[in-house]
């Protein structure tokens, strides 16, 4: 399903930009970069703090845009899931796996915590995922 592929790509891009944002934050707060523009430095190098803040704001805007695109793709995927006849539990399982980017074992733990009466195990998740794939394949969508 192309929406889930786009979601995975966006999640990778978001994590890359968040890593850049962390690096810029640490560079900005390092003692070496605490140079103010009104203090004599011996040269006209400008204010490095301002440069880092501008870069950080640009990256934050990019991340915000990617989050909006992510929510749009999830919304369109959710519509397709409902058209395919997926239950809310199945959609929730897909949300943990693809939108939250959890590993299958973490998906099992989340489902166990949220729905303890269902007794989620690895086999149950495996069969639920196979049932999801079958329902989507009947509607011409493939994961």
Image (tube, grey):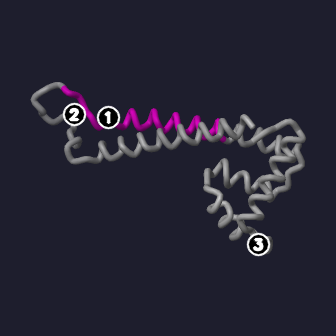
Against 48, is 18 above or below? below
Dot 3 falls on a residue whose secondary structure is: loop
Number of marks present in the image shown: 3
Range of the magenta residues?
45-70
Residue in the picture at 25% in, 32% down: 47
Q: What is the distance, in whole Å, between disc 3 and disc 2 at their CAs?
A: 62 Å
Crowd around label 3: few <14 · some 14–19 · many ≥20 (10 Å):
few
Find residue 88 and report its horizontal and vertical position in percent: 82, 56
**Tag 1 or tag 3, which sits nearer the N-term?**
1
**Tag 2 or tag 1, which sits nearer the N-term?**
2
Which residue is denoted by mark 1 in the rendering? 50
- Which label belongs to residue 119? 3
* Between marks 3 and 2 in the image, the one whose residue lies nearer the viewer: 3
Find residue 59 and report its horizontal and vertical position in percent: 46, 35
Against 19, is 38 above or below? above
- The picture quadrant where one finds residue 138 is top right
Q: Is residue 31 magenta?
A: no
Which residue is denoted by mark 2 in the rendering? 37
Q: Is residue 62 magenta?
A: yes
Quadrant of the drawing holding the N terminus:
top right
Find residue 81 and report its horizontal and vertical position in percent: 82, 45
Q: What is the distance, in whole Å, between disc 1 and disc 2 at their CAs?
A: 9 Å
């Amino acid at each position: 399903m192309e929406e889930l592929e786009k979601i995975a790509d966006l999640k990778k891009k978001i994590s890359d930009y968040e890593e850049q944002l962390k690096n810029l934050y640490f560079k900005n707060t390092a003692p070496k970069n605490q140079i103010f523009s009104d203090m004599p430095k011996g040269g006209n190098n400008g204010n490095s703090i301002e440069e880092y803040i501008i870069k950080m704001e640009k990256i934050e805007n990019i991340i915000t845009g990617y989050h909006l695109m992510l929510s749009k793709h999830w919304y369109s995927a959710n519509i397709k899931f409902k058209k395919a006849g997926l239950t809310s539990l199945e959609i929730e399982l897909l949300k943990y796996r693809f939108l939250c980017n959890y590993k299958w074992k973490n998906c099992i733990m989340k489902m166990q915590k949220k729905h303890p009466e269902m007794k989620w195990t690895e086999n149950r998740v495996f069969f639920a995922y196979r049932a999801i794939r079958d329902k989507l394949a009947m509607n011409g969508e493939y994961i």
